[in-house]
Every structure is written in structure tokens, then in C-alpha cells.
Image (spheres, rainbow, N blue to C red):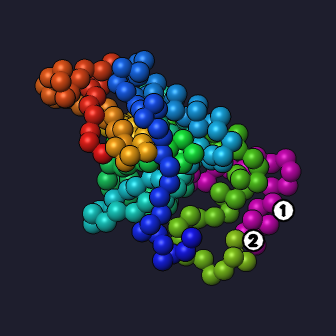
Amino acid sequence: MTLDTLSALRIKYKEKKEVLLEENINVKEPITLFKEWMESALKTEEILEPNAACLATVNSKGCPSNRFVLLKDVSSDGFTFFTNYGSRKANDIATNPNVAMTLYWCPLRRSVRIEGKAEKIPVADSLKYFHQRPRASQIGALASEQSTRIPSRHHLDVAEQKLKDDLGDDKEVPMPNWGGYLIRPQLIEFWQGQVDRLHDRIVFRRGSDVDKEIDGTLVHKGENGWIYERLAP
């Protein structure tokens, strides 16, 4: 396979017996379904980082950017990741909290897309997680002012070594301008690939007026304030 043959690239998706049907979703709300899908991904050896997620943000000029982050918690409130608060993504969120996140588990032919608003989590929660990380990761986060210009790789190595010398093996690593964000979802889409390209797409939405859309045919009432619908692939 070469770049010249990208247009002809095809992979096999799921068979018809593995379709995603609404009646097989036991709890009609997306957080429970997401956790079920994540459990499957965690048990799939071919997936090296099941919590890797592509996060999209938009700056004050309306220009989008995206990058991969690691999802670190899922709760009824939403989805949590951690980053440097001086990074581009953090600056984007400060001016426009609307974000989107996508996870893709290729061996399972499954993807989840999330839209919502991001907000900083309490400092105490960020501090607790920061000190649960490997010490080398703590020092690395302190040594690197994420997204700032640096003259060379050597610059980072010197900064890291100086911190190691100063802190030794016993001193607590101070948390830099760093912490977590919680994405409070307004939309979560579950996608499952099918062999004939008639992929399954189930979308859960919530908001102040979504109940008005429920008709029992195209838009259905879910649980915990969610509605759900199927979209054509």
C-alpha cells in the first residue's frame, strides 16, 4: 500500500449481525453506554491507548485546532482531561468554552463524538491527580511551559535536570500552571462501522428545549434529561 492507493483503501467493518440497535441499549442515556464501550476498548489488546481522544477547540478569531489528549475520568457530570493552563487549548477554552472530543477504537470499528462546554475542575482535584502521576511526569510538566517557543531540545533537558537536582528524591514537586478540565456534554454520538457502509449512528442530546422535539418516531425520550435519535450515515 502506498500514498498513491489511498483512494482505494478499504477495510472490513462489522457484519450485519453486529448492528447497533436502539432496543439493545439497556440504559437510554449516553454516559452508561460510553462506559460500556470504553470497557470493551480496555479489554481489546490491539488498542494501546483506549483513552486517547482528539480534542477540538476554537480561538477568539474562530480558528479551530485539535490535538490528542488522554481522557482521565468519566462521570455523570462529563469527561475530564488534564493539560497545561498556558497551552493553546487552554487559551482557546478561556475565550470559547465550546469544545468537541472524538475517540476512535479501530479494532472495534467504533467511535464516540462528544460536544459540550469545558470548565476547569477544582484546584484540589487537579493537585490530587498531579501528585498521583509518576514523579518523572510531574517534573516534566514543571520543566515545560507548554506551547511556548524554545531554542532546542537541549533547553528542555537542561531545565529537567536542574529541577531534578533542586528537588532531589524527596521534595514534593510543585504543581505548575496545570490542571484538569471537565467537558459537560450536550451531545454524544455513537458510531459503529458496518460492512456495507450503512454505518450505525445514535445521537444523544440534551438542553433546555430538547423535549419539545420528542415525537416517538424520529426523536425519542431517554433518561436523565437526554433525548436520542438515529442519523443516516
Counting every numbered tag in the picture gives 2
Amino acid under disc 2: Asp
Screen quadrant of the C terminus: top left
> Where does residue 73 sit, x and y in percent of width and height?
55, 35
Residue where numbered disc 2 is placed: 157
Q: Is residue 145 left or right of residue 196?
A: right
- Of residues 198 and 27, the one drawn nearer to the viewer in this rendering: 198
> Where does residue 203 sit, x and y in percent of width and height?
31, 35
- Of residues 105 and 84, the one drawn nearer to the viewer in this rendering: 105
**Mark 1 or 2, nearer chain start:** 2
Q: Is residue 29 magenta?
A: no
Q: Magenta stretch: give its range.
A: 157-179
User: Can residue 120 be seen in the rendering of this structure?
Assistant: no
Q: Is residue 101 left or right of residue 207?
A: right
> Where does residue 122 sit, x and y in percent of width and height?
50, 36
Residue 165 is marked as: 1
